[in-house]
Image: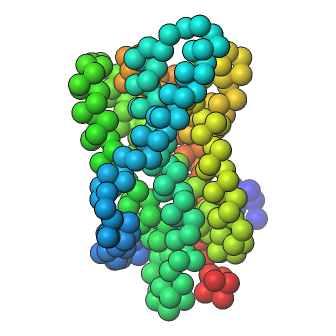
Amino acid sequence: MSSAVLVESIKGSMQAEGRSVSRDFWQCRDLLMMLTWRDITIRYKQSIMGFLWAVLMPVLVVGSGLIVMVAFSVMSGKAINKSDVLAIAVKSVPWAFVVSAIRFATNSLTANKELVTKIYFPREILPIASVLASLFDFAIATGVLTIILCVTRVGISVYCLWVPVLLFLIIVLTTALSLLLACANLFFRDVKYLVEVFLTYGIFMVPVFYSASRMGKYGILLLLNPVGPLLDSLSTIIVGHRAPSLPWVGYSAAWAFGGLVISWLIFRKAERLFAESI
């Protein structure tokens, strides 16, 4: 078999599989919405703070960032300006979404053992439902952030048209990681502990507390994490009113869509073993 024929065969197989998954998802769309709403209600059930929990994580991130900024200010002798604080606030909200979505999605399969073993449906629905539930929290926190930006008169520019694109890439990248980690955690239960460690210290591996440009020649290390360029671009657009770096946005987009395809293929390949391994 020639390489061209092999490529066409693989392409045809993936297209057929994609149509099958799309059809299954459409048929199970009500289940996806039900599981998403269940995850949302479970988080807020009997909660004293209610929806304020959605903004607590970003507030904690901003508070931690202020501590870091004060330390840098004392060492460098430079005063803290409003733009730096707002930049942290802008980046903390999507970062909190990434952390929340991955944390809940990683445990989504093992936490729903009865559904995985007894009912047929696209198993991808479970981690995706966790991502959508975290997206609900993200929407609330974004609303609060928008009010803050309006009060502080940050202003708006034509570059803000990039914001939906960047947020979409963050969601796609988070979904890709969620599918892969949920699958891995089903077979290796210590994955969830490793995820917790990486999420705890991951904030130091992305430009949330500081921009990559302020790190000089070491700033590129922060941007190698595909989430990094997207967060840095958001603060550049919203606070700095400048265009994002297209090469770095393209880099993150390649990771997002490439990662989603690879994660989905791995997930579908391993799905047949879920029932006996869970």
Q: Is residue 72 above or below residue 274?
A: above
- Residue 226 is left or right of residue 132, and the answer is right
Q: Residue at x 24, y 33 (%)?
A: 147
Where is 145 relative to 194, above or below? above
In this view of the protein, which residue sits in the foreground, 249 or 202? Answer: 202
- Looking at the picture, does residue 277 appear above or below residue 20? below
The percent coordinates of residue 25 (x first, y second) are 39, 71
The location of residue 152, given as percent across then percent down, is 27, 21
| Image quadrant in which you'd find residue 102 | bottom right
Look at 28% across and 39% down and name the residue there. 144
Q: Is residue 264 visible?
A: no
Image quarter for residue 117? bottom right
* 158 shown above or below 5: above
Name the residue nearer the viewer: 36 or 244. Answer: 36
Residue 198's spot in the image, x, y percent?
66, 50
Locate the N terminus and report the quarter of the image it occupies.
Answer: bottom right
Percent x, y for residue 112?
Answer: 50, 80
